[in-house]
Amino acid sequence: MSLLLLNREIGILEFNSRVLAQAEDPKIPLLERIRFLSIVSSNLDEFFEIRMAGIKEQLSDNPSKEGSDGRTIAQSYDLVSHHAHALVDRQYQLYQQVLIPQLRKAGIQFLLPDYWNGEQRVWAEDFFKEELFPLLTPIALDPVHPFPRVINKSLNFIVQLEGKDAFGRKANLAVVQAPRSLPRLIKIPHRLAGNQDTFVFLSSFIQAFVSQLFPGMAVMGCYPFRVTRNSDLFVSDDDITDLRQALQGELPTRHLGDAVRLEVNVNIPEALLQRLCKENNLDMRDCYRVNGPVNLVRLAQLPDLVDLPKLVFKPHAPAMPFKRGAGTGAVSFFERMKHSDLLLHHPYESFEPVLDLLREASRDPQVLAIKQTVYRTGDKSPVMEALIEAAQNGKEVTVVLELLARFDEQTNINWAARLEEVGAHVVYGVVGHKCHAKLLLIVRKEKIHKSGKTSLVRYAHLGTGNYHPRTAKLYTDFGLMTCDPLITKDVHQVFQQLTGTGMQLETRELWEAPFTMLEQLVHHIRAETKAAKQGKKARIIGKMNALLEKTIIEELYKASQAGVKIDLIVRGVCALQPGVKGLSENIKVRSIVGRFLEHHRIYYFYHGGS
């Protein structure tokens, strides 16, 4: 079975290759191509921090161990490293040979020190002295000052020196870290740039005036470098007594994990490169020599620094699925949901109805309780503010807040503190699992018509996307607003499992991982396989972020062999190999990459036509 699975890390790099293809596409507006270029770099940062870091750990533990694709860890590392280098080379070739000339043609340029005129150099030196110099701390490398453990993904410079300092010490090398508080792109005043949008990289200021940090010494060279470190947090499930406290102990040291990648400029001398590799316990396979800035992620800010609407996508205005009510006669969301369920398709339809529902619930005197799961929501979140308001208004508010949402841990810890301050119940998911479900449950006391008696009625929102207003404008997701009693009962039972204890509660309408989802998917795939073997029509269509589950892949292979026509739309990693004769020739796999990040999950089974 192992030979029938594709390599996970290669799949991630191939996805990023498809994103880079967007940056290469001349039909896409120029500044959006820059944005796609920076997205690839951001994705690669996380890839090295998590996936490559994991491979390197396995490489040191057991290099001959076989992975799911049949390769040893050592073979996988070589293969993945080769693909990563090729992708980065392609990035910088596009940057230098295509995007930079096209930006210049559009009136946008990055001005290097060699091309500054007299006035620009005076302005640049003033900027360096006033904004940069007070923040810089040069560290000489000598027996008293060992090589510093530079912070993860920070911009640094290794400086070659000649001469002696004020103490008579002879230091040949020094390290300077660029301040993280300053932007990486600084705009030259229009009067000095011929009324063009002209920028200077922060690194250019440091390289041009670094000699001012070493008075009386000769600077022989100044070379930027960037170290990426293992950023996967380790919190032992067995030893946890307080997850929040354990995380708070781990987070401060995340940026100082083991080095996994070194990025340098192509012009760095070989001896300095060897020194940097040695100091960071890396070999040459871990070193990426680039022809341009060592951090293309920071180019993402460029579209926001210029006013050239023709070079970006036209603004997208999401549709409202219904007209907003206004004034005292406005129809409430609860009345709308009683009339019919509402399926929202973001970002084509607005996320505002979800926020409006939550705000209305937080202020409605008939609402008694609100329960919600939160995975990612951002540090400024109207969702969380509405939950805080609800708690302040006396509602029973319960929030299942996933503290282990990668790179959002501190944000979620901060929200947990604010929620607890106003009396909300905060639960940190389930130890050993991540709470990834997106659920909102509202319990409302309502009069039963005619009888005048009251009853508790449940309303729910279920989604494929995070409760995050910003990503709701960028990711394609579904959200269902419903008061269907079977669905809302299931949602209530899921919350019971997440916040309480006891055996699994049976749900009728919802499939829940890790309990019933895999079992149900296998059941439905097998039903299509059986139908195909009986000569009946059989069809499977699936849309998902990734496909890695071996059991599902094996069942899909069997379905294909039985003659089931299968279409899979997999945005990212896909370990299934389509189109193999006798195995998967009835399976087609495609990936959609574009302006919006494909994020919804849909599973369709023909099921005899029903």
Image: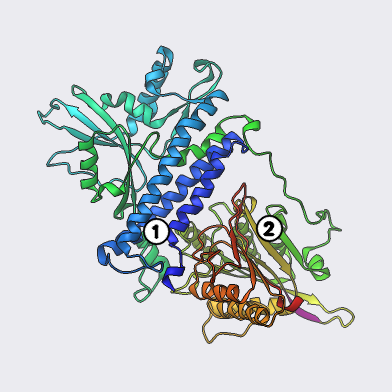
Taking the image as shown, residue 584 lies to the left or right of residue 316, namely: left
Query: Between 330 and 193, which is closer to the camera in this rendering?
Result: 193
Q: Amino acid at mark 2?
A: Leu
Q: Which of the 4 quarters of the picture holds residue 351?
A: bottom right
Q: Is residue 20 magenta?
A: no
**Marker count (numbered):** 2
What mark, if any, has residue 355 been given in the picture?
A: 2
Q: Position of residue 508 (x, y in %)?
A: 67, 82
Q: Residue at x 24, y 45 (%)?
A: 277
Q: Residue at x 69, y 76 (%)?
A: 488
For the magenta stretch, what is the residue range?
454-458
Q: Is residue 291 above or below residue 552?
A: above
Mark 2 and mark 1 residues within 8 Å of each other at the beta carbon? no
Residue that carries the numbered disc 1 in the rendered image: 51
Task: Decide: few, some or many residues near mark 1? Use Cα within 10 Å; few <14, some 14-19, many ≥20.
Answer: some
Badge 1 element: helix
Residue 462 position, x and y percent, is 66, 68
